[in-house]
Every structure is written in C-alpha cells, then in structure tokens.
Image (tube, coloured by chain):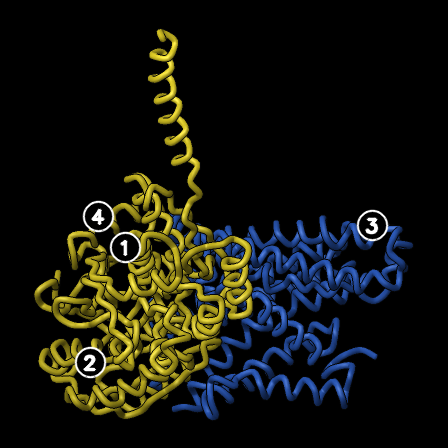
Amino acid sequence: MKRKYWMLPATAAFATLAFSSAQAAAPPIKIGVIAEASSVSGASIPKAAQLAADEINAKGGVLGRKIEIVTYDDHNSATDAVRAFQRAAREDKVSFVIASYISEVVLALEPWSARLHMPMITPGAASDEISHNIYKDYNHMKYVFHGYLPSTFIADSVCDGAKDLLVQGHHVKTAVVMSEDAAWTLPLDNEYLKCLPRVGIKVLDHIRLSPDTTDFTPIFNKIEGEKPDVIITGISHVGVQPTVQWAAQHVPIPMFGVSSQATTSTFWKDTNGATNGVVFQTVAAPGVAVTPKTNPFTDNYTKKFGATPSYAGYTSYDDVYMIADAIKKAGGTNPDKLVTAMEATNYVGTIGRYVFNGKSSPFTHTFKVGKGYVTGLMVQWQDGKQVTIWPPDVAQGKMTFPSFVKLPQ
Amino acid sequence: MQALQILIDGFAISSLYATGAIGFTLIFGVSGVLNLSHGSIMVTAAVVAWLVAGSLGAGPYGGALIGVGASVVLSLVTYGIVVRPIQNSRAIAREEKEIFVLTGTLLWGIMVQEVIAYIFTNNPKTVLPLIGGVVNILGVRTPGNEIAIAAIAWITMGLLWLLVNRTRGGKALMAAAINPRGLTLCGFELGSIHLLVWTIYGVLAGIAGVLLGSFLGVSSDNAGQLTASAFSIVVLGGLGSVTGSLVAAYVVGYLESLTAYLINPSIRTVPVLLLLVIVVYLRPQGLLGRR
C-alpha cells in the first residue's frame, strides 16, 4: 500500500514533465519570407519579420508553438522567387509566405499561391493587378493578400497631399509626371493623370523612364524645357541617381510623389544629402506616432539593425502579427481556415488599422484606406531628417526646399 | 542651347569612359589579358570612396584617394590570385590560357560584385563630389563637379602619356606590348612589367570609378554594364590601341549623349551597339587597331 501512495506523485511529476517537454518540442510554425536581401527596400522585409517573430516568441509564441522565419533571397528575380516559393511550400513546409516588394515578382507568385493553396501576403508591391486578379478569380486566388497600398490609392494619396501642400500652399498649377517603367507605375500614372487635374494641377507631360537609366540629365533637361511647377515622381527601382543628379544640376523644380528608396534613413547617406528637399509619400515614418505601435517598432528596429526600416519593413512587421492572430483564430495552419481568419482581420499595426476588402471589391484583399484605417503621409527630407509635413494632424514641420528650387509665389 | 548641353555632357562622359577603357586596353596590349572583372574593380573604388568620404568622415579628397588605393590593391589581388596562377599553370594548355583568364576574371568579378551587394546593398552610392556648386557656361547650368571630372580625366591621361613615353619603365611597358620576348632578352623581368601595368591599370580604373561615382552614382549592379562598356570601347578602338580607345571613348560618349537627348534616354546604348556590330563586321581590327 505504502508503495502505491509513493507512486502517485511520481506518476504525476512524470506526466507533467512529459507534457511540458512535448510542448517545448512542438514543431515551430514556419513563415517563409521571400525578398531581395541586397536592396534597401527588400532588406527590411526579413529583418522586420524576424523582429516581430522574436517578440511573439518571447511572449510564448502562437498556440504554444514558436514562430520560425525562413528567409529566401530572390535577387529581385521572378524565377528565383517562384523557386523559393515552391521550396517554401513543398520542402520547408511553411504555413504562410510574406513575399517581395516588387510587383512583377508578386504577380509571378500569385498563381503559385493559388495552385499550392499557400497563403501569401506582399508587404510592399503596389500594382493594382495583384488585387484585381484575386477579384477576377476569387475561388482560386483567395490565398493572396495585398499588404500594401495599391498604386491607385498611392496616387490618390499623393494628389491629396499635393492639393494641400502645393496648390493651396504654393499656387502650383502645372506638373510633369516622371515615373519608372514598371508594372506598379502603370495604374499609378493612370491615376496621377486623372487626380492631378482634379486637384487643380495641369499635367504638361508624362515621362516613363527605363529603370536602367543612369544619366538623368537629358530627362531633367527636357522637363525643365517644359517649365512645370513641380515634378510628380513614381520611382522605386531607381532613386539615388535621379535624386543626386537633380541636386547636382540644381534642377529648379521640386520633386514630389513616390520615391520608395527615400523611405529608409540610409538614403541620406547614399545620396550624400542630395535628397534634401525631396518630398515622398509613405505609410509610416520615424518619429510619427501613426499608431502607438509605430515608434516602438521604429526604435527597436533601428537599435537592432542600425538604420530605420523601409516602408516595406513596417508592413512586414505587421504582417507577422496578423498571420499569428489568424493562426490563433483558425486554431491551426489549415490554409482555407487561415484565409477566412485573415479576411476577418481587424488589427491596429504600425501604419494604421488593417481591415481587408472583401471579394465584392475590385481591390479584393487590399486593406481599407482612409480615416480610421490606413492613411498616407507626405514626408520631406530636411537636413538629414525625414520630417512628416502632411496630413496636418501628424505633421512635424513645414515643407521647405533648398535654395535652388523655385516655387511659384 | 541643347547642342551646347550635349557637347558639355558628352565631353564629361567620354572623358570618364576614356580613363576606364585605356587601363583596360593597356593590360590587353601588354599582357594579352581581357580583364572581365573591370566593372567590379571600378565599383569597388567608388563604394570604398563613398564609405571613407562619408561614413568614416575623410572628406571627398581622402575618400577619393583611398578609393583609388582600394582599386590598386584589388587589381593586384586580381592579378595575383586569378590571372597569374592561370598564366603559370602547367595543367592548362597554352592556347587555352586566354579563355581561362577570361572566365577566371569574369567569375572573380561576379564574386566581388556579390560581396559588395551583400555588405553595402545594391543601392547606388554617390561619392562626395570633389567640387560642389554649378557653373553657368553660356547659359548651360553645368555642375562644377562635371568640369572637375573632365579635367582630372585628362590630367590622368596626360600623366599616363608622360609615363609611357618619358620614363624607362613606361618605355619597357610599350616594348612588352610589341615584343615581350625581345624585352626579356634585354634583361627586363616580364613579371615586374606585368605588376607595373596592373598597378597603372588599378589607378586608372580607380580614378574612373570614383569619378563615375561622384557624377552619376554607382551600384554593384552596374559592374557588368561597366565591363561591357569598356569592352565595347576597346573593341571599337582596336584591341590594345591606346589612341584607338581614346577616340572610341569619345565616339561612344557622344553617340550615347546624342541618342539620350535627341531620341530617348531609354535606348542610349542601342546605337553604340549597332555601330560596334558594323565595325566588327567591316573592320574587325577596330578603328585604329593594329593588324
């Protein structure tokens, strides 16, 4: 009898030990991150995702399992990205993929996401086609989520900013649209050409330049000859070179619009300060508390990696949290249940509140834009700092240009 | 006005092309090596200059000097660990050595390019300009740095001319290009001639890289294009001909500028490539090549 009493606590202890070791040994939930590691915009994606995973894991993970980030460098190549996607799904058995900031790459991955039933979100690609493809063939394409603003919304955000800052602030009346030739700028330019006249800016010319351009002198020369009040930009693959040459040649026209490379703090160093005065659209900026999560993320990221995140870093960080929430809600990693859980997302991240558009919207699985959701910011480089100048409720300073830039009075 | 603009821009670009290509052709002339890591060496010079001048606070001149120094070191390393072992190898047949050197330098160039992209990202870097501000030349707003670039390129080429024509080492260099066997019979060590030509090449490629970095900005992605551009100029001018490369650099620079200004900047290299095809077809020895 005595012996039996002794065995009871021993069995309980053994069972507890066995249970906790089973929990510790529970396989991690893997999230694949496909991005170009050597580009400024792309490099932020895996780093920010890892930061989010570390934070989630420090708090016990999801459903008692750790999150593991598996990274793949796609070298900005759709072929490499597709190969990485297949490997992530078939060999590495990831449950979700965060993929690229390049529209061409994401468009190439979309059918694979559908075929392999592998949920995927892009933290930075902008082409409208990504969400239009989901809308057109929802049943197959529903695994894809567009975790960044579509180009049309970006253009609208630039136009809204231009109306307040340029038209009302400086009586700007004319513009030349200067965009790189890429998938994401097709809808961007279309919308620019519609929304700029709507806010009172006449478009004098529309220049689409090759992303391989190195000497922008002839382009600036042509633009200057047309005497616009402002250059409205749509650049992401290029950035340093047009900016440096704009400043070196003292092109007297301000650059205002989208300049993705300008969103990271290293851009000042890369251009030796030539970016002073450049105004760019983004969704979050250092020091601007878009939400209570923005500044802590920016600070932690900067402390860990020595530079502020690019725009895709903010969204990539939020994506991991949204995926973790969806896994929790879905009670596991079943792809169809994950999609349903993602569609029910209502999450305040670093750039605003994420609520995805449903299948009835032509922008299926993009997030809602506007007050109370995600809104755009206009930020200007001023003496080594990114200063938010619009909208007025979060503005940190006023728009100001280097002396060589002449604005209409 | 536009004509003057083309004249000024074309001149600056052409001078840069000439500086880089002359080094490239010199090595071929003296040692028969086509160095396909040329672009990577130029990019290294620019990125080191950018790093030292900006982040390490050495200023534009300090950065430029160390950038050129890095190019010399990398050139000598390229010669020491890629070219020379292939040239001295007994395992490779004599007639196959050229193709091995070509492949070796190509792969080495890709490695250097990847390392730069890995450490510094492939975002273009801009070297601090040696001279700031703009100068008005008959109504054309020209960056002061653009004028400095053309001047430095020509001073460099002038010094090279003096070195080759007025010094013993330089004359030996030219002799090696004409008759290497004769030179060794005269008691010259061919190995040290090769070291000298790789050092000169390093200086030229370094200066071209740093100047290009301050003019247009340079990214690791540009390495292949820079090699191709030097290669085109050298083939157009005539392999091994320094004067030919100089002339070809100006033909290429101006043809590109004319295309960019008058037709479309997106196709600036297309007419040059067409011209190259025509020259190779009608005059395979190039504009001023020896044959």
Q: Quadrant of the N terminus of chain A?
A: top left
Numbered disc in front, either 1 or 3: 1
Q: Quadrant of the C terminus of chain A?
A: bottom left
Task: Residue under label 1, please give it.
Answer: A329
Q: Chain B shown in which color?
A: blue
Helix, strand or loop at mark 2:
helix
User: Same chain for the residues at labels 4 and 1, yes or no?
Assistant: yes
Q: Residues within 10 Å of mark 1 (few under 14, many from 20)?
A: some
Task: Residue under label 3, please give it.
Answer: B189
B139 is higher (above) or lower (below) than B213: below
Q: Residues within 10 Å of mark 4 (few under 14, many from 20)?
A: some
Badge number at residue A159: 2
- Distance CA(mark 3)–CA(mark 4): 65 Å
Amino acid type, callout 4: Pro
Numbered disc in front, either 1 or 2: 1
Residue A391 falls in image quadrant: bottom left
Residue found 9% across the figure and 81% down from its top: A168
Q: Residues within 10 Å of mark 3 (few under 14, many from 20)?
A: few
Residue B282 falls in image quadrant: bottom right
Front position in the image: A15 or B223: A15
Q: Earlier in the sequence, mark 1 or mark 2?
A: 2
- Distance CA(mark 3)–CA(mark 2): 69 Å
Q: Which chain is yellow?
A: A
- In the image: residue A22, left or right of residue A234: right
Q: Residues within 10 Å of mark 2 (few under 14, many from 20)?
A: many
Q: Earlier in the sequence, mark 4 or mark 2?
A: 2
Q: Earlier in the sequence, mark 4 or mark 1?
A: 4
